[in-house]
Image: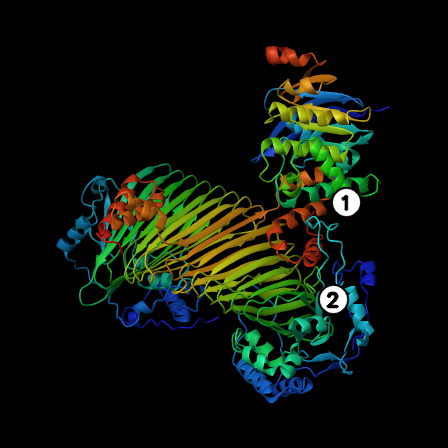
Amino acid sequence: MSQFLDISGLNARIDADGQEKEILRGVDLVIPPGEVHAIMGPNGSGKSTLSYVLAGREDYEVTSGSVSFQGKDLLEMEPEERAAAGLFLAFQSPVELPGVNNANFLRTAVNAVRRARGQEELDAVNFLKTVRAAAKELGMSPDMLKRNVNVGFSGGEKKRNEVLQMTLLQPSFAILDETDSGLDVDALRIVAEGVKRLRSPQFSALVITHHQRLLEYIVPDRIHVMAKGRIIHSGGPELAQQIDREGYTKFLAEAA
Amino acid sequence: MPAVTETREAVEKLGLSSYKWGFETDIDMDVAPKGLNEDIVRLISARKEEPEWMLEWRLAAFRSWLQMKEPEWAKVSHPPIDYQDAHYYAAPKKKPGPKSLEEVDPELLRTYEKLGIPLHEQAMLAGVEVPEGEQARMPVAVDAVFDSVSVVTTFRKTLEEAGVIFCPISEAIKEHPELVKKYLGTVVPVGDNFFSALNSAVFTDGSFVYVPEGVRCPMELSTYFRINSRNTGQFERTLIIVEDRASVSYLEGCTAPMRDENQLHAAVVELVAMEDASIKYSTVQNWYPGDENGRGGIYNFVTKRGACRGARSKISWTQVETGSAITWKYPSCILQGEGSVGEFYSVAVTNNHQQADTGTKMIHIGKNTRSTIIAKTISAGNSDSTYRGLVRVQPKASGARNFTQCDSLLIGDQCGAHTVPYIECRNAQARIEHEATTSKISEDQLFYCRQRGLSEEDSVGLIVNGFCRDVLKELPMEFAVEAQKLLQISLEGSVG
Amino acid sequence: MSAPLAVTLEPFRKQLEGVSGQPQKTALEALHHTGLPDRRVEDWKYTSLRFLAGSVFHKPGKNYDSAKARAALAALGLAEGAVAELPRLVFVNGHFVADLSVTKGLFACSFYTADKAEPGSLVRSDREPLAALNTVLAENGVVISVPEGIDAGQVLLVSLGQADSDAVSYHPRHSVHVAKGGKLSLLSVQAGEGHYLHNPVTEVFVAAEAELRHVTLQAESDAAANLSTLYAQIEERGNYDSFVVGIGAALSRHEVHACLAESFAQVHINGVQRLAQTQHGDITSVITHAAPDCISRQTVRNVLDDRARGVFQGKVLVEQIAQKTDGYQMNQALLLSGQAEIDAKPQLEIYADDVKCSHGATVGALDDDQLFYMRSRGVPEGEARQILIDAFLEEVLELIGDETAREVCKTVIARRFPVSEEGA
């Protein structure tokens, strides 16, 4: 029986200005259903690359390794197929879509995913009701639904908008790529509440973060330390405090 | 007469094209022999039962056309057009004129049904924002022009009560000669350019609108143009006059069946706005663009111009150009009245082998005149698209203002996007600002949309619609819905 | 195909007789075919050559007035300060004058002669009629070659026109080659007295990783015409950084054709025009991105007074291969008088999809609020206007990288436009 998410020996590189750069060098990671894992690690360790590769960004070339997601070969799927299959990436820097109305975008996305999952599409009226309620819970002003996707949003607003999308798309697996960066304490709590509400035996998450602050709100089942493109250490939630106190030096030394 | 009647469904089943308006209607037609000479001009005038002055006007236009050369400056190329190889008159066989919809050839009505006129889309579902507590839709009066002839005009009674004249121009020539005589050719003179001269000589119909002083036209006026017959040029002529403190919103839609050969369309539109008058003219142009290999399609050579004659008058052009093999079109404003306002909002999409050279001219003559130009150009496939625009400030136009924003989006590396603005300023108290950008669809945006579950084509459609937002929002709501769909259809097959 | 010949070659008829040499003959043929362009030719829509009609331009002799030439150099501020120390090449009426030149410290410099004309270079006599005219009539010019890896420092190139009762025309042919990794800063100053036509053609080759800074100060006689054509080719990671200052001549056109031929090459074509009375000044450029990853930048500002007319035409052409092109163009004009006119035609022609290109244009008058603010602080109107005009030009003049060249330009502009006591 395969695991919910099983990453094995994953290597990936990117072509940067004509030069190939290895970023992931043999990532092994297993996430069982219902668990929340966190990845911590210094800058440039490959955390964001891992999230992009899982979501299917084409700039990255997977050179070896495999990723199975709910028994399927994730790497063979198009980005939108991964989304339909239940994978959600909350972007570190959410992209602006000028001229595209936020509510309209949300509904297009929700219905595309529902269609792919064989669920009935939401009509405009029902959708608006649902989205307004969800936005309210996240402390978003209704005005944000009328604006263009992420255009002119503050850092905090963008992150909340990501969580709003996550809430509506109902993923089975969410990757939160530094969703805590740029958030004040109140916003952080609201975002964490949003994630907590999704927690269930059918929902797993991978939280990528620099700080243990977020992990105080979303307590993970496991924490992994990533460096130089690999997971170099794994442990329980207590690892967060240790890293906060001692930094990564010790783990890096052990790995070397 | 063509024998094949292709329905939209049949075409779609064959998977021949994504052009869903490519059906042809089998209707008994009265067609003049091919070719263009004085006799044909006389024949057209006679068929339309025109007064002598009109015939003289046409003949003068024809003679000046003979002296003119086809313009070459636009960035379009096509094999030479044989002006003798087309029919200049084609009309549904004359029965007593239809008085109401019931009397119109049912085949024709079915055609318009297929065209989706009037449109009943639920705007909200198609993603158009509707203000909360939306009001009941305004009715739309439609004038349908089939090949060269206006076949039906709806809601005439209601309009008449308001004092608004909305009728085929052929009828206006007979019923309102004083108005036609006074204004026809005053905005686009007969000899203005090659195609306007041709149009003046051979136009067979079009719409005429007159809104008297102080009247706000109670409904949107709409004309649907359709080219149906083979080898027919369509030369419609539209004249809209809006008197002091009056206003009108006019919509124009265009389609044609799929053909192997190219068909010529050379319309002339003249607008006159008097003191405090306003005219909003919206176009969704979806003539047949030709197939993936550039075979067939309409040559769309159109002259559109509005004169803001009165103080504080306003003319606003909005166009969504997705069709035609070649588009050559520069809706313009002559800003004569003090404080008058000209606007041009344009989306031009080209795919496959389409060519578009379109833009506007804003001529600032009066004091404190203002103009705004927003042009969005999208090129895909092997197409070429050019924005060409002129902003001219005459010496007396103190306080004139212009703002121009031209953005081009490229999809694929086999297409071209060009921006050619001309800025001529002869007044020191004027202020002109122009900005232009060219870029491709951003990979970040595409990936973001796909991560949220949208297919690549839907993602492109969404981003393109966003790119065009500032223009689409100027369209009346029903048109905006149609335009959004058209954009997406036009770009089908352009990604991946 | 044949263009209308509204501006005839009559003013040059005498000089065009008895042309020998094959490149000259070919160019003459092309010239007879197209004629001099009139305004129906799209590229000459805003600039008429009618100024040339009605005159007969003579071929100038080698005699010149030495005292006048020295006075002119002094008036241009070239006899003092840092610029006086530079190696200099001085031409009078198109002839090199050794007596006025300082070749010490200058190397790899030779002279163009008509019999050594090399066909197959960048010049397109078939396309640009004035370049064709130059090819037919060019007799002299400088050829500067900077060898590989050498920083050749600064060089001053001066052209002086001297015409008395007879109008003269001269057509120098210059070329500048900077070999791989080489460097040069060239200041070209053009001035004179009387009625003449200065019709130079310059070819510029910037090899891989080489850099050429090139400032042209056009301060010709008020009765003269300056019609310059410049062709530049820039290779991999090369940089051609050019700037033109146009303040002189009754009729001027500075036309640049720059080709970014290899990847990561850069070109800057910046400039200012400060014109008054009935002057007509035209800055026209065509920048071709023929390779990926190249950068082009263009900022041009115009200040136009009286009945002056400024023209800006700037085309950026991005070929299909030129992905990742980064192009930016800005043209701005300040109109100081109700009779002044600006005509601008920026143009993007793009065939590659992964590009970032933009252009902007603005036209306006001096800001009344700013003027009022300064006057309310006691600054007289004339001075306040001057401050605003200077500030407008200053921002662009700062783009001149060579400090010596920048100072010369500023000095010459300031001498030509002293602060007026009363406002215009």
Q: Is residue B468 left or right of residue A73?
A: left
Examine the image and state in which quarter residue B396 appears: bottom left
Q: Residue at x 24, y 52 (%)?
A: C417
Residue indicated by mark 2: B258
Residue assigned mark 1: A125
Counting other residues with Cα less than 10 Å from the Cα at mark 1, is it few (<14), some (14-19), or many (20 or more)? few
Compared across the picture, whether C172 is left or right of B88 comes to: left
In the figure, C293 relative to B286: above or below?
Answer: above
Three-letter code for the amino acid on which mark 2 is drawn: Met
Q: How far across and down, in percent of the image, does residue C418 sit?
A: 22, 50
Q: Nearer the viewer, residue B436 or B96?
A: B96
Image point (72%, 18%), residue name: A220
Quarter the C terminus of chain C occupies: bottom left
Tell me the quarter of the picture where residue C107 sits.
top left
Residue A132, picture quadrant: top right
Q: Residue at x 69, y 85 (%)?
A: B47
The residue shown at (59%, 58%) is B346
Q: Residue furthest right?
A: A1
- Of the residues shown, which amino acid type is indicated by label 1? Val
| Marks 1 and 2, how far apart at CA | 39 Å
Q: For residue B366, which numbered disc appears in the image?
A: none
Q: Is residue B403 above or below residue B99?
A: above
